[in-house]
Amino acid sequence: MRMCAMFLTDDELSELTGKRQNAARIRALNGMGVQHKIRPDGSIAVLRAHVERLFGEKPQKDDPEAAWTPPWINKRGL
């Protein structure tokens, strides 16, 4: 089973933003509220986990809201 990389790849950044140039990608990421860092070489680092949480792909394991149940629902589902 292949582990996912910690950061999005260049191709994934292009797919996410619809842009190829880093300046345009940064504007798109800012507009979408995606946190990112600029590396010393000028490339963009975006955490895969941040994008997955932001777009609702995977709930965080220790996120209390992910397991929240409304108080009016009891154990029998009523």
Image (cartoon, rainbow, N blue to C red):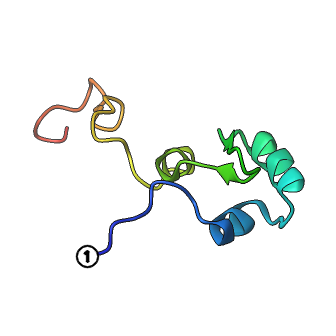
Q: Could you tell me which residue is drawn at 53 percent across and 55 percent down?
A: 7
Residue 27: x and y, percent?
A: 86, 46
Task: Name the amino acid, label 1.
Answer: Met
Q: Is 5 on the left or on the right of 27, as rendered?
A: left
35 or 45: nearer the viewer = 45
Residue 29: x and y, percent?
A: 75, 47
Residue found at the very far front of the displayed protein = 41
Residue found at the very far top of the displayed protein = 71
Q: Quadrant of the C terminus?
A: top left
21 or 62: nearer the viewer = 21
Q: Is 36 on the left or on the right of 25, as rendered?
A: left
In the image, residue 9 above or below residue 41: below
Label 1 sits on residue: 1
Q: Quadrant of residue 76?
A: top left
Residue 5: x and y, percent?
A: 44, 61
Residue 13: x and y, percent?
A: 68, 62
Q: Could you tell me which residue is drawn at 60 percent across and 65 percent down?
A: 9
